[in-house]
Amino acid sequence: MHITDIIRKKRDGGKLSAEEIRYFVEAYTKGDIPDYQMSALLMAICIKGMDAEETAELTFAIRDSGDRVDLSAIEGMKVDKHSTGGVGDKTTLVVVPIVAACGLKVAKMSGRGLGHTGGTIDKLESISGFRTTLGADEFFRIVNTTGAAVIGQSGNLAPADKKLYALRDVTGTVENHSLIVSSIMGKKLASGADGIVLDVKVGSGSFNKTPEAARKLAEAMVAIGKAAGKPTAALLTDMDVPLGRAIGNAIEVKEAVETLRGKGEPDLVALCTELAALMLHIGGKGAVDECRTMAKTALENGTAFRALLDMVRAQGGDTECLTDLSRLPSAAISVEVAAPADGYIVAMDAAGYGRASLVLGAGRERKEDAVDHAAGIYVSKKTGEWVNKGDTIAVLYTNKGSAVAEAREIVLASTVLGSERPSPAPTVQGVVL
Ligand code: URA
């Protein structure tokens, strides 16, 4: 087989066979196809597209390109969740304990933040002592005893995706439906869970700018999960506005704990409840309505918070950081951003808020950058709320005084004031089962 024939075939709008797809994924992962040829093929895929069958084959080839995690040492059904990436998205820290408290197992591998989106591993590492790298035996033992563990992704999970994603990033080929579907589902299917719930974001902070694109993505991913023999479901959720009020690392852990202690923001509580309900449902715990009631009860009666404490303790974290939130990392500098005029907040650019948080030190531009766990933003006012000139719309936290002016500018440019009260989009906008 020759890569040039495959490039020409896709350039001319042809349909690639399973063998051709397997060939280029394996050969590229091994280093037998150079970046310039793979770039040409990726661009041909972007322009000509792939049908559902090609997309599924690409997903399975990415899944099979490295280790496939075997979770069979963990008793019972294991369910996983994945978010397509958002700003202020601390749902894993809330949903995983809820699901564990309701009797399902979650053996989760999460990522670090990149660009304007945060990552669960960075957030968890703001808890002193918390270990995000565990050997397989310890990972399985913790899930078996506490119901949940969250670790970083193993080095050899879907290596084809690591190489392809890095190349897509620098060749203008990230934004293609089939490449996104296969990238996300290839990794998720290699992670070994029995069932998967996807949180597909739509809005200014997401790569899905329209509800139609988000639904198409969700439907394709759910179909591929099912074709791989895993119960899979998706929620379509709002990312026009940051989720909850906290953006960063320690500040998001704090908000997650407050949510688990019954003091959560309505949008965050609604999303976490629905995600947990879907995970419990596909994990065989009952109808979605029954599972929603179970999830709410675990949130309200404190069992979910206790499940988080159990998991953090088992992973070496200092649980006193969670029972006394003042022990989490805190920044030397805090600066309030004042509203420049009276009005309703009529729109927010969630990605802009994510970028401001990155500038303050909470995120990373490149994979190798370090993050400042104490940095971040508290969003005091969100879309739909009224502000008087001079009211605080956000509080910036940082240890880098030189970052404040730029972050303030970005926050102000990402907050649109107007005189008409808007009706913000609901947090949960649809479900694909
Ligand atoms: N997230 C991924 O993992 N892959 C993509 O292609 C886009 C978002």
Image: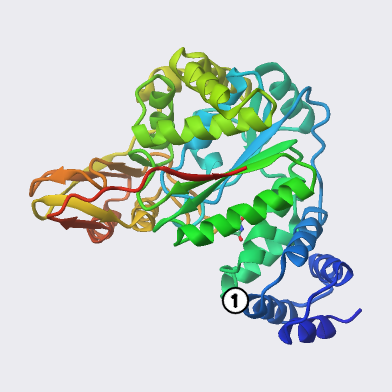
Q: Position of residue 376 (x, y in %)?
A: 35, 44
Q: Nearer the viewer, residue 422 or 71?
A: 422
**Please, is residue 297 above or below residue 373 in the view?**
above
Q: What residue is rendered at 70% in x and 22% in y?
A: 142
Q: How is the image coloured?
A: rainbow
Q: Is residue 365 visible?
A: no
Q: Position of residue 279 (x, y in %)?
A: 62, 32
The vertical placement of 320 against 200, above or below, is above
Which kind of residue does numbered mark 1 sit on?
Thr
Secondary element type, mark 1: helix
User: Where does label 1 land, which residue?
Assistant: 171
Residue 136 shows in the view: yes
Q: What's the residue at 78%, 53% (across, down)?
A: 63
Q: Quadrant of ligand 1?
A: bottom right
Graded by Cα atoms within 10 Å as few (under 14), some (14 to 19) or many (20 or more), the crowding at tag 1 reads some
Name the quadrant containing residue 355.
bottom left
Q: Is residue 267 above or below residue 45?
A: above
Residue 399 in the figure: left or right of residue 312: left
Residue lying farthest to the right in this orientation: 1
The picture places residue 151, in percent across and down from the top left corner, at: 64, 36
Q: How many marks?
A: 1
Quadrant in the picture for residue 268: top left
Q: Quadrant of residue 40?
A: bottom right
On whether ligand 1 comes within 8 Å of the CB at mark 1, the answer is no
Position of the N terminus, as image quadrant, is: bottom right
Closest to the observer: 205 or 318? 205
Q: Position of residue 89 (x, y in %)?
A: 45, 42
Q: Is residue 244 above or below residue 302?
A: below
Which quadrant of the figure contains the C terminus?
A: top right
| Nearer to us in this view, 112 or 274 | 274
